[in-house]
Amino acid sequence: QVQLLESGGGLVQSGGSLGLSCAASGRISTITAMGWYRQAPGEQRELVAEVNAPGHTNYKNPNDARFVISMDNAKKTVYLQISNVRPEDTAVYYCSAHDFAYWTNKVPDHWGQGTQVTVSS
């Protein structure tokens, strides 16, 4: 069993920066990719970005350079740096992880509990 623990959420002013981290524990040897999703009030959960063990990334919006994902594969810890945050970035951010095989659009096998990010204007 895999547990994912997010940290780093909170309140940030528009234009500021925020860093999220998520550490996996338990049976982590099978994790091949990790990522971040978010869910805004009244909206569906959506992908923000994912990264696999070799370091290949998949961003929902590759043209939005404000989001940078990285992963420490040895520690099975994934990070998300958000710069120049906007009020529309307000959401619950969920960490995710894939066991064994990973491909774009694959539904994650594990989810964290989520961390709230609120951007004030």
Image (tube, rainbow, N blue to C red):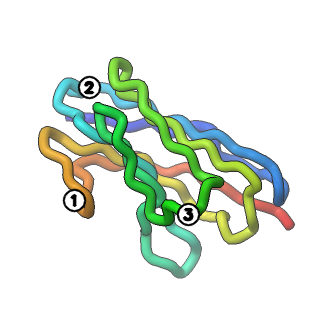
Residue type marked 1:
Lys
Q: Is residue 101 above or below residue 121?
A: above
Looking at the image, which residue is at 49% across and 51% down? 114
Question: Residue extending furthest top?
Answer: 74
CA–CA distance in space, label 3 to label 1: 22 Å
Question: Which residue has dot 2 on it?
Answer: 26
Q: Nearer the viewer, mark 2 or mark 3?
A: 3
Looking at the image, which residue is at 13% across and 39% down? 100
Question: Which residue has dot 3 on it?
Answer: 63
Left or right placement of residue 54 versus residue 67 in this view: left
Asked whether the viewer can see residue 37, the reply is no
Question: Which residue has dot 1 on it?
Answer: 106
Q: Quadrant of residue 106?
A: bottom left
* Percent of width and height locating residue 29: 20, 24
Q: Quadrant of residue 66?
A: bottom right
* Percent of width and height locating residue 46: 43, 68
Q: Earlier in the sequence, mark 2 or mark 3?
A: 2
